[in-house]
């Protein structure tokens, strides 16, 4: 059974940082481009970032470029997202996913940015 399990979400003040993790199992993680997507309350799912199977190339949504960094450790079957300079508009449920649309995603981890 394929599984993606996210963790690391929390309540943080504006300007703060978090690191999200996603542990994958049940499929050959190291062969897949992986994504982070997010969904804010009352909004549609939004693609955030992706990295290739080797972790040597990545791209970001304009809304997070320069603030978020995606990375992966294929030996640990783990995908990461470093969130810096957080803004209130970054508040959302964050998911790791096998596809850009977020169809094959985990259960998510909640990030709340508030003072």
Image (spheres, grey):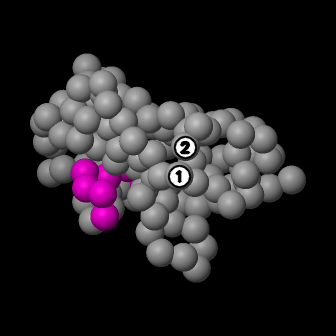
Q: Which mark is residue 81?
A: none
Q: Quadrant of residue 37?
A: bottom left
Name the residue carrying label 2: 65
Magenta segment: 95-101
Secondary structure type for disc 2:
loop
| 37 and 95: which is toward the camera | 37
Give left or right: position of 2 versus 111: left
Where does the image place residue 80, in percent across and percent down from the top left?
44, 34
Whether residue 22 is visible, yes or no, is: no
Where does the image place residue 79, in percent across and percent down from the top left?
37, 35
Secondary structure type for disc 1:
loop
Q: Is 100 included in the stretch rendered in magenta?
A: yes
- Identify the residue shown where x is 59% and y is 37%: 66
| 55 and 112: which is toward the camera | 55
With respect to residue 12, does 55 lie above or below?
Answer: above
Where does the image place residue 67, in percent across and percent down from the top left?
61, 39
Q: Is 77 included in the stretch rendered in magenta?
A: no
Name the residue carrying label 1: 62
- Identify the residue shown where x is 23% and y is 41%: 33
- Identify the residue shown where x is 80% and y is 55%: 114
Could you classify mark 2 by the number of other residues whose Cα lies within 10 Å: few (under 14), some (14-19), or many (20 or more)? few
With respect to residue 8, does 103 lie above or below?
Answer: below
Q: Are marks 1 and 2 in contact (CB under 8 Å)?
A: yes
């Amino acid at each position: 059974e394929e599984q993606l399990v996210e963790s690391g979400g929390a309540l943080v003040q504006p300007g703060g940082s978090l690191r999200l993790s996603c542990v994958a199992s049940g499929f050959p993680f190291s062969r897949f481009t992986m994504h982070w997507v997010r969904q804010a309350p009352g909004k549609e799912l939004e693609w955030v970032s992706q990295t290739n199977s080797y972790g040597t190339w990545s791209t970001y949504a304009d809304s997070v470029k320069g603030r978020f960094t995606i990375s992966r450790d294929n030996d640990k079957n783990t995908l990461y997202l470093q969130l810096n300079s957080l803004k209130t508009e970054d508040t959302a449920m964050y998911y790791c996913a096998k596809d850009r649309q977020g169809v094959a995603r985990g259960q998510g981890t909640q990030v709340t940015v508030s003072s």
